[in-house]
Amino acid sequence: MKAENATPQVILKDVRKSYGQLEVLKGISMSVNRSEIVSIIGPSGSGKSTILRCINALAPVNAGSINVAGIEVNDPKLDERALRRRVGMVFQSYNLFPHRTVLQNIMMAPLQVLKQNRADVEQRARALLAKVRLSEKENAYPGELSGGQQQRVAIARSLCMNPEVMMFDEVTAALDPETVKEVLTTIRDVAAEGMTCILVTHEMRFAREISDTVYFTDQGRIVESNNPKDFFENPQDDRTKAFLDKVL
Amino acid sequence: MTTIVSWFDPGSVWAILIPWFPLMLKGFGLNIAISALSMLIGIFAGAVLGALQMSKIKAIGAPARFLTLFLRNSPWLVIVFYVMFLMPFEMRIGSHWISFPDWVKAVVAFSLPVTGYISEIVRGGMRSVPTTQWEAAAALAFGPVRTAFSVILPQAFRQMLPPTMNLYCSVAMATSLANIVGVQEVITVTQTILTTETKPGLILPAYGTTLVLFFLYVFPISLLSRRLEKIWGKGIQR
Ligand SMILES: Nc1ncnc2c1ncn2[C@@H]1O[C@H](COP(=O)(O)OP(=O)(O)OP(=O)(O)O)[C@@H](O)[C@H]1O
Ligand SMILES: [Mg+2]
């Protein structure tokens, strides 16, 4: 699965982030290659979401550097929009726009932000809806969809910006067990097409199956990272062992 | 029956008032025009001011919040006086002189508090939309202004409409203050009637007529606003 052309596309170097007095990230370094699938796992509050939010500049960092596809995120003159059109993000709570139909949700950003041609965007949006198997719902409002369906729309919405990196933040955590599968299938499809993916997840089996690299975070630090086989079968750090004992 | 017939006896109160009705209606038309125009201006200015209040940039947010507070907490009558006396009656634009009749000044005066109230309604409406919506839009490379207008305000619309309608009712009634500075609105007309006609006992029926006019105009709006509030009370649900 590991891509041959190992060009780093997302690089974090000693990233530190505090909220007030609380230091949430205490020196995070990681490197994600093009087409690599990376999973971040760890206990609640260990800073997983914060890492993702720093990567697309939703949360400014205090120290260290983040480089995404050549864009220096910690640059005071950062063009946030240029960064965010390269990095898609899907949230645990879907966050679809409730006043817009499914198709409109997907088309809004390419039309309004990228100012792309409507016919092209519509074609692309329909193709993406077909890919997430929701073509028949294009005129539905988000409130009329199940959680799993909403989440797949959210993934399609993000993909319609043609990002180079996709980030998924516990996108199945709010779903019923039956619908988790359909969303994981969608993510698997996205990953299979060569998209660089960073996912925060509690689905250990999925992380093991899909990832090239697994990172374990605890209290704002990366405790351990490895290929999934060794990570799950032969964890090194005691904190990793304790965590895996609890969740597996 | 006898009372109704006696209304139209020559020399009765109503026989005197009824010929004045067209003029009173015309005056009331001015009340409606002033309230509608000042509301329109206030909605646009207030939407901008309300959005500015939300700005994370201190140099923008703080003055916007102060101005909102100031506009909301100044007595309307005082604002009317200030605008009447501070605003020139004509102004030169290029080679043209534009004159401001009193009713235009009244429009300007009332649009000021409306701006303050709308600003607050807009801020409250925007805050009612979960911050995750801002984040989702930001993650899709929306800028803050586009997020506000494309994502946040449409969702806040249902919540903002009823208080805006209530505000309009207040503005419509407050336009009667304009009589103090001589605008020919319905109260001014009524006072003219009272000084022209000498028949005693005219005061209550005359003011009663204006009361009915205001009530007939404002009550349906107020009812509608209540119903919308009930229907939409629980935010967006589709
Ligand atoms: N906006 C914020 N303001 C203050 N503190 C915050 C903020 N966001 C996160 N935190 C704190 O930062 C720490 C890390 O949060 P983060 O959301 O990154 O954890 P997480 O690993 O994603 O946890 P979970 O598995 O519960 O989602 C937590 O202690 C949290 O309380
Ligand atoms: Mg999280």
Image (cartoon, grey):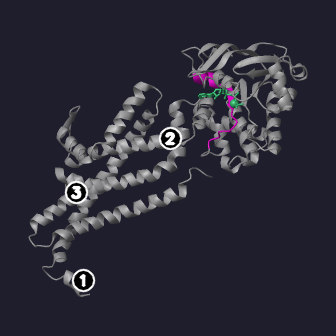
CB of mark 1 within 8 Å of CB of mark 2? Answer: no
Q: How crowded is mark 3: few (under 14 residues within 10 Å), some or many (20 or more)?
A: many
Q: Is mark 2 on a helix, strand or loop?
A: helix
Q: How crowded is mark 2: few (under 14 residues within 10 Å), some or many (20 or more)?
A: many
Residues tagged 3 and 2 counted as in contact (Cβ below 8 A): no
Residue A63 versus residue A57 in the image, above or below: above
Q: Which residue is drawn at 67% across and 35% down?
A: A120
In this rendering, position of residue A87 left or right of residue B202: right
Asked if residue B95 lies left or right of residue A229, the reply is left
Indicate which disc, 3 or 2, sits on the residue closer to the N terminus. Answer: 2
Which residues make up the magenta segment?
A: A80-97
Q: How far apart are marks 1 and 3 (CA)?
A: 29 Å
Task: Return the residue found at the far bottom.
Answer: B2
To the question of a shared chain for discs 1 and 2, the answer is: yes
The residue pinned by badge 2 equals: B126
Q: Earlier in the sequence, mark 1 or mark 3?
A: 1
Helix, strand or loop at disc 3?
loop
Q: Distance between the residues labelled 3 and 2?
A: 36 Å
Left or right, A177 with reference to A125? right
Please name the amino acid that badge 1 sits on.
Ile
Residue for point 52% across, 45% down = B156
Which mark, by number, is residue B4? 1
Residue at 72 percent across and 24 percent down: it is A165
Name the one closer to the observer, A96 or B65.
B65
Chain under label 3? B
Instruction: State which mark lies toward you, 3 or 2.
Output: 2
